């Protein structure tokens, strides 16, 4: 059953809303664009649940956005350690490794994403 608010939207808007709702809360927070606030909240989440793969992944996305690539790599590698079946994690890792000029590792990460 659709959320009553979503029923009022056009079909394309409904698709966008459903996509938004199906993402992790951590990713939705990141999408709002306030990276400093998102990072602060994610660090709080990780202090309580350090194995939250979604929060770790989003921390990696933030690191990628602010060009802190080593930090980003560490967070995404941790996310993969806790949830190794998410192709988005491997795609993000590939982007990070590419920025770190680790081309061969980036290719392997992209291949891993395609295999999932």
Image (cartoon, rainbow, N blue to C red):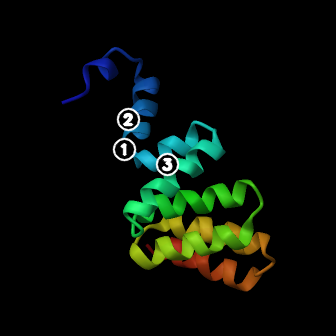
From mark 2 to mark 1, how far is it between C-alphas?
A: 6 Å
Tag 3 residue? 27
Residue 28 percent location from the top left of the image: 48, 42
Question: 76 and 36: which one is in front?
Answer: 36
Question: 90 and 70: which one is in front?
Answer: 70
Residue appearing at x 64%, y 55% in the figure: 62
Residue appearing at x 72%, y 85% in the figure: 104
- Residue that lies at the very extreme toward the bottom in this rendered image: 104
Which of the 4 quarters of the picture holds residue 109? bottom right
Tag 2 residue? 18
Residue appearing at x 75%, y 72% in the figure: 98
Residue appearing at x 81%, y 78% in the figure: 101
Mark 3 or 2, nearer chain start: 2
- Residue that lies at the very extreme toward the right in this rendered image: 101
Mark 1 or 3, nearer chain start: 1
Going by the image, does 31 lie left or right of 71? left
Other residues around mark 3 within 10 Å, as few (<14) / some (14–19) / many (≥20): some
How many badges with numbers are in the image? 3
Query: Above or below — where is 70 with respect to 104?
Result: above
Q: Depth-wise, is mark 3 or mark 2 nearer the camera?
A: 3
Tag 1 residue? 22
Query: Above or below — where is 61 with respect to 86?
Result: above
Residue 76 percent location from the top left of the image: 56, 70
Residue 21 percent location from the top left of the image: 38, 38
Query: Above or below — where is 8 with respect to 1?
Result: above
Q: Quadrant of the N terminus?
A: top left
């Amino acid at each position: 059953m659709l959320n009553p608010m979503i029923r009022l939207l056009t079909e394309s808007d409904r698709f966008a809303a459903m996509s938004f709702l199906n993402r992790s809360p951590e990713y939705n927070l990141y999408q709002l664009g306030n990276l400093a606030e998102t990072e602060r909240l994610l660090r709080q989440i990780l202090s309580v649940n350090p194995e939250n793969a979604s929060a770790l992944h989003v921390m990696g996305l933030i690191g990628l956005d602010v060009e802190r690539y080593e930090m980003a790599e560490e967070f995404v590698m941790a996310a993969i350690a806790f949830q190794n079946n998410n192709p988005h994690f491997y795609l993000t890792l590939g982007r990070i490794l590419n920025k770190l000029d680790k081309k061969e590792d980036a290719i392997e990460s992209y291949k891993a994403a395609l295999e999932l």
